[in-house]
Amino acid sequence: MKANSYRRKVLQVVMMIALAVFIFGAAVQAADWKPTKPINFVVPYAPGGGSDVYARAIDNVVKTEKLGSERFLIENKAGGGGSIATTSVAHSPGNDHMLLTFISGQVSGPLTVGKGAATYRDLTIIANLAKDEQFIVVKTDSPFKTIQDLVAAAKKQPGTVTIAGTATGQEDQMCNRLFERAADIKVRYIPFKSGGECITALLGGNVSAIWANPGEYIPQYEAKMVRPIAVANDKRVALLNTIPTFMESGYKFEFDFFRAIAAPPKIAPEVVAYYGNLMRRVSDSQAWKDNYLNKYMLSPLFLEGKDAVEFVATNEKIFADILKDLGLVK
C-alpha cells in the first residue's frame, strides 16, 4: 500500500513538472518569434465598413498601448462578399506577416458558392475579439418611426420596402430572412459590398432601410442623419437602450455575429502563439474597451485557438440552416 502511495505521489510530481514545462514552453514559444517587417492586415471589405473599423481599431490599440513593435499595413480588398480577400490569404501558406479580419459573412459566403471557395478550414483562426448586434436603421426623416411601421408598409405593399445589407448570403441577408419569417412579410433585399456603401445608399434615399452594426452607422447617428428602430439581440444594447429588440416588438428572432482574426494556413506554432497573445492583450486593454467596444457598442467575446475554431464551426452549422431556407444552399 505504501509503495502504491509513493508511486502516486511521484506520478503527481511528474505531471506537475510536465505541466509547468508545457506552460513555460508555450510562453517561450510565443516569445521565440517576432515580426521582422510590416504585417499585411487584409480587410475583405471596402473602407468605412465594420471590418475596416475593426482592423483600424486593433492597429490603433497596438500602437497607443505599445503592445508590440509591429506595424500594420491595412489593405482593403473588397469583392465577392469577402471571398476575394479570404481566398488570397488562404493561398498564402506559411506567410507569417499576414493577417485577415474574419467575420460571420466569411463563414456563410462559401456555403453559397460550394466547392472551390476558401473556408475557415483553409485558414488559421487566431482569435475572436468581439460580437456585433444587428440593427435595422432608417433615415432620420423616414416615415417609419418604429419597426411596426415598416412591417405594416411591407404587408400593405409586399416587395416595395427595400432593405440593404452586405452581399448575398451573408449575415445581413440571413438576419433579413429571419425577420421576414418572424414578421410574416416580404421585403426586397439589396446587397452592397460594404456597410459604408449601405449607409451611402440609405442617405441617398435609394433604400428604405439598412441592416447595420453600430460601427457602421454611429457617426451618422450622432450627426442625426440616421436612427435605428430595432435590434436583433436578446436584450437592449446598453448605450442605445431606447431602441427596442425585435423580440419585445413582437417578432421572435435574434441574431448577432462575430469578429475574429485569421492568418494564412501552415504558419508555425510560435507565430500562432505570438498573434494569439497579441490579440489577447488587445482584448484585455482598457483602450480596446473604451475606443472600440463601448464606442461602437459591441459586446466582448474573446476566444483563442481551439475554442475559436469550434465557435466558428458551430456558427457554420447555424448559417447553413438559414441559407437552406433562403434557397441559397441545397
Image (tube, grey):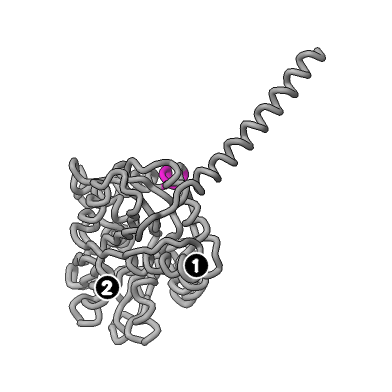
Task: Please identify the residue farthest to the right as the structure is shown.
Answer: 2
* Quadrant of the rendering where the N terminus is positioned: top right
Three-letter residue code for mark 1: Trp
Q: Which residues are magenta?
A: 307-311
Q: Residue at x 44, y 52 (%)?
A: 34
- Residue 18 location, x and y as percent? 62, 31
Crowding at dot 2, Cα within 10 Å, few <14 / some 14-19 / many 20+, comes out as: many
* Quadrant of the rendering where the C terminus is positioned: top left
- Residue 25 location, x and y as percent? 55, 39
Is the residue under label 2 in contact with that under label 1 (CB below 8 Å)? no
Q: Residue at x 52, y 68 (%)?
A: 65
- Whether residue 206 is visible to the viewer of this picture, yes or no, is yes
Question: Left of 56 or right of it: where is 16?
Answer: right
Q: Which mark is residue 288?
A: 1
SS state under label 2: helix
3D distance between C-alphas at marks 1 and 2: 22 Å
- Residue 293 location, x and y as percent? 47, 68
Q: Residue at x 31, y 65 (%)?
A: 74
Three-letter residue code for mark 2: Gly
Task: Please identify the residue farthest to the front as the structure is shown.
Answer: 36
Q: Is residue 38 above or below residue 306?
A: below
Question: Left of 110 or right of it: where is 38?
Answer: right
Crowding at dot 1, Cα within 10 Å, few <14 / some 14-19 / many 20+, comes out as: many
Q: Which mark is residue 196?
A: 2
Front one among 33 and 156: 33
